[in-house]
């Protein structure tokens, strides 16, 4: 009896699945991707981490108990050479070497980190999409002259790709002088070749599609085809890559700050700078390095989890 | 003079290190205004390449050579520069493709794709273009056009997508429409509707239509004149009725014979043409169809058969054509051959003047049947 019931249940389940799939037909790529994203635990974890991070970055600075640059520990005399007090009920993460409240600095630093990550990614995205878009459109639709444009642009991109990313970022940062803007530009430039190559490849693939042929057969201009037809269809992988780039951008920005190429005004709290400052006091207070390091890792993990899940959700090959 | 005169059109693809492929080899045909002309043949016979060459849509690549003429209303389409070609496309000559889903941009609403053509060729913008687009959709039989304009291709059914594509193609009232297997990707009931729509459009607007298909049912229902292609050449040209009544070229005979018939017995097998379209002889060495032909004679091999023009305006490219009934001594021998469409045994789907009862039944000869 149980087996028969089980079989029946199985059959019903299968039917329900089929019906559900029928319903799913006629849902756009993005809606479909979003639906699968919601079912993916990794995506949920990533989204939760990012939501917390963004909330902290946006409203945290208004709620911190102490000013992030207030050297109260020195004023109060609790910081002595060789002594940095650890966590307490007043100062959850303790003081840093200049007697500032580490918890407040961490919270305020989240905003800097988010800003650097987002702006750097946007810079990379803008330049990469511009170069990749022009190259892709030229290669896909432009004939012989277009192939020449494409080769020229891509050789430039190859040059950027040939350098290790951190070395490239350090060179750019050194060239422009240390500042927060420098970090953003340097980290952004490092991600340019990835965006450019990705968009170009995607656009060339789309240029061979039937709807481009159909639009051509209706006399639509090439520039219009490139902008209105090919580009919107090629953006999905680039958007996914942007999410993943946010993670690397945060890590690279922290690395540049750590190397002293970031904001020279160490009063402005930033996780990378805090990490750099902490290394001299590792013997006394190793936690000082652990707090920003863990924060960076968790944030980058959040972006990576969400980005990878998005990539999976949008990949037609992985669809059932 | 005809609206479109294709003369001796040849398309060759050359690749380094590979044999040069002559996809279209001296195709000539003409289309009068308001006429429906069929290009019929198996896959790989050069139908689509012919149409793409006329439209100038073949991918520009080294090794591609297009020769001959395609004179449309006094101008040779093959000699046009890119700019004037783009101006003509969509305005004077438009094309409908096989797969309506992939021929529409998935991320752009239907409305924008239709108005794009209107903006490009008729300078219409904003509300005027939207209104005209809605009228176009209405004209091709899409219900509730205002709402459909805002929808994306995936929200439309297959038939409606093809209707939308047809709306885009006829947006500027082109004088010539090329339809490249417009019904192949659709199911049978929708096929009939789309063919009906195309027929109406041709009748109402006087547009000439070049119908590219492998489906003899479609041909029987629509075309005035039919060109049968094999191996990149036209092997037979005739008006519809004579072609179906008395096919002369053995290939046409074979095509008609391989159409499944409703009145055939249950256990009866289909009559495929033996071999596949790849087993062709290069034209300079004789008739390309000779390896698969059951009327082959010695004269078939050696030099290409000339185009024979008959007194009733037909032409065929064969040295030993199927005889006309009652005129030739080989009449008895003909009776013994299976699959030959003689006046008494025209396939059910291929009766001229009837709308195709069931298009899509013209089966291409399958390789499994090859002896």
Image (cartoon, coloured by chain):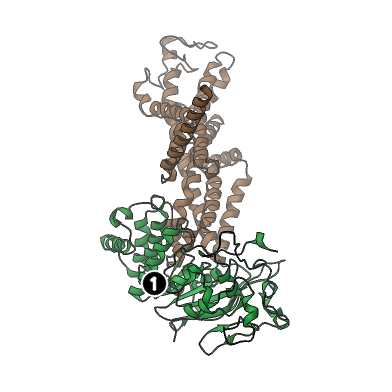
**Horizontal placement of A81 versus B154: left or right?**
right
Front residue (pair B362, A37): B362
Disc 1: which residue: B91
Q: Is residue A245 visible?
A: no
Q: Is residue B336 visible?
A: yes
Pinpoint residue B205: horizontal percent, then vertical percent: 34, 74
Q: Which chain is brown?
A: A
Q: Quadrant of residue B334?
A: bottom right
Front residue (pair B143, A237): B143
Front residue (pair A25, B289): B289
**Horizontal placement of B34 versus B345: left or right?**
left
Pinpoint residue B325: horizontal percent, then vertical percent: 57, 83
Secondary structure under tag 1 reads loop
**Horizontal placement of B14 versus B34: left or right?**
right
Residue name at image x 47 percent, y 68 percent? B218
Q: Is residue A295 above or below residue A36?
A: above
Residue at the bottom extreme? B311
- Across the whole image, how many numbered discs are drawn on residues? 1
Q: Specify few, some or many for label 1: CA neighbours under 10 Å numbering under 14, 14-19, or 20 or more.
A: many
The colour one sees for chain B in the rendered image is green
Pinpoint residue A310: horizontal percent, then vertical percent: 49, 38
Chain of residue at mark 1? B
Pinpoint residue A180: horizontal percent, then vertical percent: 47, 36
Q: Is residue B20 above or below residue B137?
A: below
Q: Is residue A232 above or below residue A104?
A: below
């Amino acid at each position: 009896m149980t087996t028969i019931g089980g079989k029946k249940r199985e059959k019903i389940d299968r039917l329900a699945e089929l019906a559900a799939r029928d319903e799913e037909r006629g849902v756009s790529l993005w809606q479909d991707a979003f639906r699968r994203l919601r079912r993916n635990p990794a995506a949920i974890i990533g989204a939760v981490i990012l939501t917390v991070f963004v909330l902290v970055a946006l409203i945290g600075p208004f709620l911190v108990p102490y000013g992030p640059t207030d050297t109260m520990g020195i004023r109060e005399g609790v910081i002595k050479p060789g002594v940095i007090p650890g966590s307490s009920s007043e100062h959850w993460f303790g003081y840093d070497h200049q007697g500032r409240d580490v918890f407040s600095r961490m919270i305020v630093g989240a905003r800097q980190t988010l800003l650097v990550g987002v702006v750097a990614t946007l810079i990379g995205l803008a330049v990469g999409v511009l170069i990749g878009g022009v190259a892709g459109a030229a290669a896909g639709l432009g004939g012989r002259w277009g192939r020449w444009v494409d080769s020229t642009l891509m050789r430039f991109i190859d040059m950027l790709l040939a350098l290790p990313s951190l070395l490239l970022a350090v060179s750019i940062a050194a060239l422009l002088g240390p500042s927060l803007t420098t970090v953003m530009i340097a980290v952004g430039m490092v991600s340019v070749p990835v965006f450019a190559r990705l968009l170009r490849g995607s656009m060339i693939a789309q240029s061979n599609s039937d709807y481009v042929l159909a639009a051509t057969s209706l006399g639509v201009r090439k520039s219009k085809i490139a902008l209105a037809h090919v580009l919107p269809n090629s953006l999905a992988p680039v958007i996914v890559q942007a999410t993943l780039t946010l993670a690397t951008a945060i890590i690279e920005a922290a690395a540049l700050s750590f190397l002293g190429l970031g904001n020279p005004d160490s009063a402005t709290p930033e996780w990378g700078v805090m990490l750099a400052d902490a290394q001299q006091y590792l013997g006394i207070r190793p936690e000082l390095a652990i707090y920003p390091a863990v924060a960076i890792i968790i944030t980058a993990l959040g972006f990576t989890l969400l980005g990878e899940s998005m990539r999976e959700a949008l990949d037609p090959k992985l669809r059932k | 003079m005809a609206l479109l005169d294709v003369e001796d059109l040849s398309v060759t693809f050359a690749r380094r290190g590979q044999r040069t492929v002559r996809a279209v080899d001296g195709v000539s045909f003409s289309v009068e205004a308001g006429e429906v002309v069929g290009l019929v043949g198996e896959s790989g016979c050069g139908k689509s390449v012919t149409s793409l060459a006329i439209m100038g849509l073949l991918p520009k690549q080294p090794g591609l050579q297009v020769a001959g003429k395609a004179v449309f209303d006094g101008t040779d389409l093959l000699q046009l520069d890119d700019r004037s070609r783009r101006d003509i496309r969509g305005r004077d000559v438009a094309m409908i493709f096989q797969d309506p889903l992939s021929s529409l941009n998935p991320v752009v609403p239907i409305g924008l794709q239709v108005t794009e053509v209107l903006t490009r060729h008729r300078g219409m913008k904003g509300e005027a273009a939207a209104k005209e687009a809605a009228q176009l959709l209405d004209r091709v039989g899409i219900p509730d056009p205002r709402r459909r304009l805002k929808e994306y291709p995936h929200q439309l059914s297959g038939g409606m997508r093809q209707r939308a594509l047809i709306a885009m193609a006829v947006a500027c009232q082109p004088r010539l429409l090329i339809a490249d297997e417009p019904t192949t990707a659709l199911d049978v009931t929708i096929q009939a509707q789309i063919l009906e729509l195309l027929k109406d459009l041709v009748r109402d607007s006087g547009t000439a239509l070049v119908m590219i298909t492998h489906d003899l049912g479609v041909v029987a229902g629509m075309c005035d004149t039919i060109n049968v292609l094999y191996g990149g050449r036209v092997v037979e040209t005739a008006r519809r009725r004579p072609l179906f009544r008395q096919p002369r070229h053995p290939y046409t005979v074979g095509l008609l014979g391989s159409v499944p018939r409703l009145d055939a017995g249950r256990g009866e097998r289909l009559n495929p043409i033996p071999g596949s379209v790849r087993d062709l002889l290069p034209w300079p060495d004789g008739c390309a169809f000779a390896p698969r032909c059951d009327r082959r004679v010695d004269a078939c091999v050696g030099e290409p058969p000339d185009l024979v023009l008959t007194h009733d305006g037909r032409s065929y490219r064969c040295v030993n054509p199927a005889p006309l009934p009652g005129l030739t001594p080989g009449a008895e021998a003909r009776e013994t051959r299976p699959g030959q469409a003689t006046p008494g045994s025209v396939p059910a789907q291929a009766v001229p003047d009837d709308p195709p009862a069931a298009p899509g039944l013209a089966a291409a000869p399958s390789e499994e049947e090859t002896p």
